[in-house]
Image (cartoon, rainbow, N blue to C red):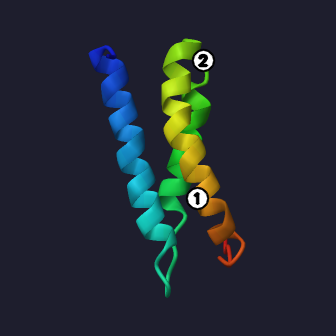
Amino acid sequence: MCNFALCVAVDFVESLCAVSDQELSSPTHPRMFSLQKIIEISYYNMDRVRLEWSRMWEVLGVHFNTVSPQLRTVNIVI
């Protein structure tokens, strides 16, 4: 069981990871917007209590491991 704020944060991270996965899997125009937001929320939430951060990291770690092979084939234009 988790407190409400943590449950909301984990649900938000799960949803953002799902959107990021959809954006990156586009065959014609892969986008990096949601992935950048995931990196930002990871940075800003690192100061959370370790137990809270570990719940979020479970979701984030799986997503990073899933999309990292896809990023090798994406041409990044900034």
Q: Could you say where residue 70 lies in the image, as x and y percent from the top left? A: 63, 70
Q: Name the residue rendered at 54%, 23% in the picture.
A: 53
In this rendered view, identify the residue nearer to me: 27 or 51.
Answer: 51
Q: Could you say where residue 71 lies in the image, as x and y percent from the top left? A: 66, 68
Q: Name the residue rendered at 34%, 16% in the picture.
A: 2
Camera-side mark, 2 or 1: 1
Q: CA distance from mark 2 to mark 1?
A: 25 Å
Residue at the extreme right: 72
Residue matched to label 2: 47
Q: Name the residue rendered at 41%, 67% in the picture.
A: 22
Q: Up-down: is 36 above or below 14?
A: below
Neighbour tally class for label 1: few under 14, some 14-19, many 20 plus, Cα within 10 Å: few
Q: Up-down: is 50 above or below 57?
A: above
Neighbour tally class for label 2: few under 14, some 14-19, many 20 plus, Cα within 10 Å: few
> Would you say 34 lies left or right of 47 here?
left
In this rendered view, identify the residue nearer to me: 19 or 2.
Answer: 2
The type of residue carrying mark 2 is Asp
What is the quadrant of residue 74 in the picture?
A: bottom right
The type of residue carrying mark 1 is Thr
N-term-proximal mark, 2 vs 1 = 2
Q: Up-down: is 42 above or below 5?
A: below
Q: Could you say where residue 7 lies in the image, as x and y percent from the top left? A: 32, 25
Q: Quadrant of the N terminus?
A: top left
Residue matched to label 1: 66
Q: Which mark is residue 51?
A: none
Q: Name the residue rendered at 63%, 53% in the picture.
A: 65
Q: Up-down: is 9 above or below 24?
A: above
- Helix, strand or loop at label 1? It is helix
